[in-house]
Image: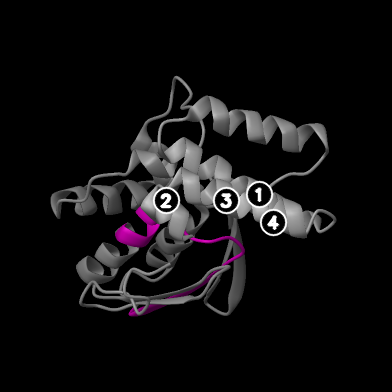
Amino acid sequence: STPRNAKNSQLAEKIFNRIEKYFPQIQDRIVSASILLANVYASTGQMEKSLNIKRKLNEINLKKPSGLSYTEVNNKIYMFRAHDLSHPRSKEISDEIEKISKELISYGHKYDSSCITRPLNENESVESVLCGHSERLAIAWNFVANPNISRIQITKNLRVCGDCHESTKLIALIRQCEIIVRDASRIHYFHKNGKCSCQDYF
């Protein structure tokens, strides 16, 4: 995560080369290192290099796992994928996401395009892509189901992106709601004062 946060492609390349050298048979590590390098390339504007890595992974049938977020609402577990429209109340969730986005912008949040690791489609914007991340949907669903909720808990199988991390800090502050996110790296405890337990080291 350090190379990604620092947008340091040279460090990401060194990590990839070492993993490829010492763990050539461990596919999970090769995939993780490849995705890290591809994401760093994308975040630094080297989109063609990023796409080349992803093409190579596809050629050998190795793919990054889909991002999934789980949350418990009213004693039932819900799962969300990025841009998931399968929920029966997805329209309400989309409306809540739009409402939250307006609140974030009013508090000065600027969506970070470097967190998007692929070219945008014609009908997409930086805001629409980032607001569609699975944990954003899970957060929005909690507020739809329980507007006055004071604590939200989410488990995600991948690491949260930088923009989601910054946004969730603000959401906790604006809505005065503790948000706990267990991602692939650590547990993030977003406090009502707008700070995270990881102290922005993730």
Secondary-structure class at tag 2: helix
Magenta span includes 35: no
Q: Determine contact: label 1, label 4, CB under 8 Å.
A: yes
Label ID, residue 17: 1
Which quarter of the rendering shows the C terminus? bottom left
**Of label 3 and label 2, which has the lower sequence position?**
3
Residue 185, quarter of the rendered image: bottom right
Secondary-structure class at tag 4: helix
Q: Is residue 147 left or right of residue 110?
A: right
Q: Position of residue 192 (x, y in %)?
A: 24, 78
Which of discs 3 and 2 lies nearer the camera? The answer is 3
Which residue is tagged 3? 14
The amino acid beneath tag 2 is Glu
Which of discs 2 and 4 lies nearer the camera? The answer is 4
The colour scheme of the drawn protein is: one colour
- Of residues 27 and 178, the one nearer the viewer is 27
Q: With respect to residue 75, does 169 lie above or below?
A: above
What separation in Å lies between label 3 and label 2 (alpha carbons)? 45 Å
Residue 61, quarter of the rendered image: top right
Crowd rating for badge 1 (residues with CA inside 10 Å; few <14, some 14–19, many 20+): some
Secondary-structure class at tag 3: helix
Q: Determine contact: label 4, label 3, CB under 8 Å.
A: no
Which residue is tagged 2? 92
Which residue is tagged 4? 19
The amino acid beneath tag 1 is Asn
Q: Is residue 32 left or right of residue 74?
A: right
Q: Which residues are magenta?
A: 150-166
Q: Position of residue 154 (x, y in %)?
A: 51, 71
For the view shown, which residue lies furthest in the top direction?
Answer: 122
The amino acid beneath tag 3 is Lys
